[in-house]
Image (spheres, helix red, strand yellow):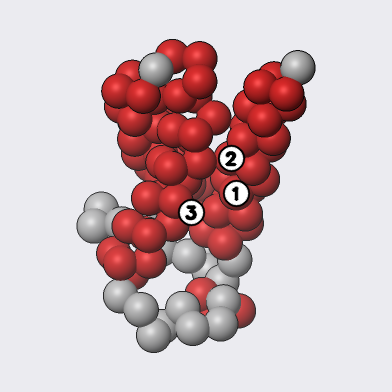
Amino acid sequence: MIVGRAVRLRWAAAAAYSILLVFLALLPPSLIPGATDVPDWAAHAVAYGIQTALLYGAMAPSIGRRRALAAGFAGAVIFGAATEAMQLLHPARSVEIED
């Protein structure tokens, strides 16, 4: 089952990237190289755009392209809100609605 293996790899990539995002969201900004060089909103747009694309790629074979795009976008938005909420518990980070 080559298709099954490819889908599993896509889900693994999406999961690994999501773990990376959580790690970066909880890391103090001073420890992230170049974190102050890019506007916060732009960094978030790129980061969650990539997550949307990875989720889309994982879901598209099973639910279709249009539904996968909507679900991938919704998943990235919910994930972004959850990581922002996690920052409430971390004293080195701040929560901003613009993120």
Q: Nearer the viewer, residue 7 or 20?
A: 7
Neighbour class for label 1 at 10 Å: few (<14), some, many (≥20)? some
Please state the horizontal and vertical placement of residue 18, each as a whole percent of the image.
58, 45
- Residue at 52% from the left image edge and 58% from the top image edge: 25
The residue most toward the left is 98
- Residues at marks 3 and 2, CA–CA distance in whole angstroms: 21 Å
Quadrant that contains the C terminus: bottom left
Please state the horizontal and vertical placement of residue 12, each as a whole percent of the image.
68, 36
Neighbour class for label 3 at 10 Å: few (<14), some, many (≥20)? some
| Secondary structure found at label 2 | helix
Figure check: 81 above or below 66? below
Position of residue 28 in the picture relative to residue 36 (left or right): right
Query: Label 1 is placed on what type of residue?
Result: Tyr
- CB atoms at circles 1 and 2 under 8 Å apart? yes
In the rendered structure, find residue 14 and report the number of the disc placed on it. Answer: 2
Q: Which residue is mark 3?
A: 87
Identify the mark nearer the N-term, 3 or 2: 2
Position of residue 72 in the picture relative to residue 12 (left or right): left
Query: Label 3 is placed on what type of residue?
Result: Gln
Q: Which residue is mark 1?
A: 17
Query: Label 2 is placed on what type of residue?
Result: Ala
- Residue at 44% from the left image edge and 51% from the top image edge: 50
| Secondary structure found at label 3 | helix
